[in-house]
Amino acid sequence: MELPERRAYRIKNTLLGKPLHTDQLVHERLGKPTALAVFASDNLSSVAYGTEEIITHLVPFIGVAAFSLVMPITVVLLVVLAFLILSYRQTIKAYPSAGGAYIVTRDNFGLLPAQVAGVALLTDYVLTVSVSVAAGTAALTSAAPALTAYAVPIAVAFIVVIAFGNLRGVKESGRIFAIPTYFFIFTMAALLVTGFARMLFGHLPVQVINKPGMVVAGHGGNGFLMGATLFVVLRAFASGGAAVTGVEAISNGVPAFRRPEWKNARTTLVIMGSTLGAMFFGLSWLDAHLHVNAYAKGTPTVISQIGKVVFGTGPVGHVLYFALQAGTMLILVLAANTSFADFPRLASFHAGDNFMPKQLTKRGHRLVFSNGIIALAVGATVLVVLTQAKVDRLIPLYAIGVFTSFTLSQAGMARHHIKEKEEGWRRGLFINATGAVLSLVVDIIIAITKFKPKGAILGAWVIIVLVPVMVYALTRLNKQYEAEASELEEDAKAAAEAPILRRHVVLVLVDRLDRSTARAMQYARALAPDELRAVHVAYDLDRAEQLAEEWRRLGLSRFPLELVDCPDRRVSRSVLEVVAEALDGETEVTVLVPRREYRRFWHRLLHDRTADSIARAVSQLPHANVTFVPYHLGADHHAEVPV
Amino acid sequence: MTPLTRLLKRRDALEPEVDDWTEMCRGTTPIESAHWRTRARVAGRVRSLRVQPWAGVPTLEGTLVDDSGGINVVFLGRRHVPGIRPGTRMVVEGMVGDHAGRMAILNPDYRLLAVPE
């Protein structure tokens, strides 16, 4: 027998490829170089906007003096980064299976704090996508200024392409990731080496900081902070904090490493951190000496301006400059892709613990968590459109979630050390406790300084409001799931052994005498019940009499047709009353509802949904059951046996 | 419970509508007081009507209800009684017997009533 597939499915099959077999769910094991490429993109790509964010928030207040403060701020951020890496080395060893903030927090503090960590991280994954895509677009428009006007459509297109690729199931296969990541590292190395070399020979010109379109410079002063207030410096620090995000990626994916997993993961983490540190340091150092100011519009980016200055205007310089821009764009897009791997997995953990809709645990057509991917894509698109794909507008929302989850997971690790007292636990406790405190301090600084930036609507407050609201919603959802589950499980065994009822009455709802009714009657007879009645709700008396007459003429009178009074024209209520009458505690009642199935969506709109509303009304009664007998309009009915 | 909280309750039966016209029909008793093998005169509304062959004889069977309960009314040998349709209000009088295991008045005297204004 031929079983046709729906058109929607056929389209899906064409777009996404053939469905993958469940057995094909394999976990590729990655060597260190490939693992670095796979996990580092989120982290490394942050340098593309880290230095720029510091500059943007300093120059308007202290002018040229800002370039003297870039380095100290960068160094402090690098200290934070170093502690995060030391802390995550502990996490990787203690949780080699899956060491995400959610799991660590859940194991050490319980489900509720885990929700906070998880939700904070989830919101940040959405932001990672938005920020990376916006920054990637900025890298593109810096190299090709003509595209600046189309920044939003370009950014949205990036999201759509990445989401589509993930729905198809871009395997975390190393080669696709390795090329852009190492290409970026290579071009950055070229930039930094050339920059230092030319600096040594004194060739590099110091830039003007008040070109049209640039951030307007303020006036500096004297003293330790060059005339800036502590608040301004802290805000620049908080904005630069975005540069150290993405450290957690490796700890989420330890099982993907070759044996011994945790050792390889730790080594890779250190390499990643050092690479980020070197690039961030080098870029800030170049900027501090070249005095490259940021543009208010976000393009051309600081890194692109530095590239132009360092590589110069010769043909080789041009090639290197465009390579740098391409590398930056690619790694930023890849960073967005990392979130597409992490967000759906984290959401599936939540859903597995009954804290998110169960749909998020289902693997789709290509064995990926399709619903999570779609949710992330929608969220990121909304943000990108709202902020017009401007990195600067997104940054205030960013990083607060990551640092919240850092804090919780490091505190969780500290607790783990106290509980388990494994070898070297004192050292681990010191590292993780320091990591937790540092993250907390950074988190608080971010929350205060970026709460609501001047002239902007979006700010850290969005996250501060959103996270508790979400956590409340998730716990509420959890309560509902638990209540449903416990109700269904209660005395399930006794219920399974309950005797069947003595009688079975089948009622066939008849609206008119047609093929769909005939089909329902045929099926009803096959059930061989103790009593079989056809029921017509007489909302129109003339029609009812006509139907009764036809019923007699066709010789169907072996089965009594019952005409039920319905003075208020509420058909489902009348059916409900008839069913209630038939129920006496010893009778199982089945209501057969002939239901027309329509071929096209708009065909269905031409009819009301009486059958469904009847089913809803009747099925609330105990031992009342509803069965739809489908009749497919427009299908081939020749195969049916005539009644 | 205030009327408003009652109105806003998610799932609650409406207060039953009092349909007391049957009490005004002279000489009738509520349906619930009809007993087997006694003569009864009751008033009510035809809630449902079915045609059913019974021992080879076509039989029109209806359920008559008032506020107190319901009783079957059976017309043997008839497929159709003019004027009796779902919703018809009528007064019936006859001996209460049983029909197919249920209490019923067989071939009663009946009078149709106009729908009250």
Image: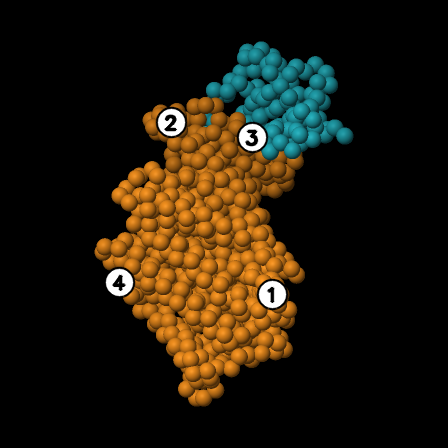
Residue A31 marker: 4
The residues bearing labels 3 and 2 have C-alpha atoms spaced at a distance of: 30 Å
Residue in the foreground of this view, choosing between A198 and B96:
A198
Chain letter of disc 2 in the image? A
Location of mark 1 (residue): A222
Q: Quadrant of residue A75?
A: bottom left
**Could you tell me the amino acid type at mark 3?**
Glu
The residues bearing labels 3 and 1 have C-alpha atoms spaced at a distance of: 88 Å
User: Which is more N-terminal, label 1 or label 2?
Assistant: 1
- The colour applied to the residues of chain A in this rendering is orange
User: Which is more N-terminal, label 2 or label 3?
Assistant: 2
Does residue A126 show up?
no
Q: In this view, does B23 lie above or below A503?
A: above
**Mark 2 crowd level (few <14, some 14–19, many ≥20, 10 Å Cα):** few
**Could you tell me the amino acid type at mark 1?**
Asn
- The colour applied to the residues of chain B in this rendering is cyan
Chain letter of disc 3 in the image? A
**Mark 1 crowd level (few <14, some 14–19, many ≥20, 10 Å Cα):** few
Q: Are the residues under badges 3 and 1 in a single subunit? A: yes
User: Which is more N-terminal, label 3 or label 4?
Assistant: 4
Q: Is residue B43 left or right of residue A302?
A: right
Under circle 2, the secondary element is loop
At x 45%, y 88%, the residue is A314
How far across and down, in percent of the image, does residue A356 sit?
Answer: 46, 45
Under circle 3, the secondary element is helix
**Could you tell me the amino acid type at mark 4?**
Gly
Q: Are the residues under badges 2 and 4 in a single subunit? A: yes
How far across and down, in percent of the image, does residue A31 sit?
Answer: 26, 62
Location of mark 2 (residue): A491
The residues bearing labels 2 and 1 have C-alpha atoms spaced at a distance of: 77 Å
User: Which quadrant would the C terminus of chain A be assigned to in this image?
Assistant: top left
The residues bearing labels 4 and 3 have C-alpha atoms spaced at a distance of: 70 Å
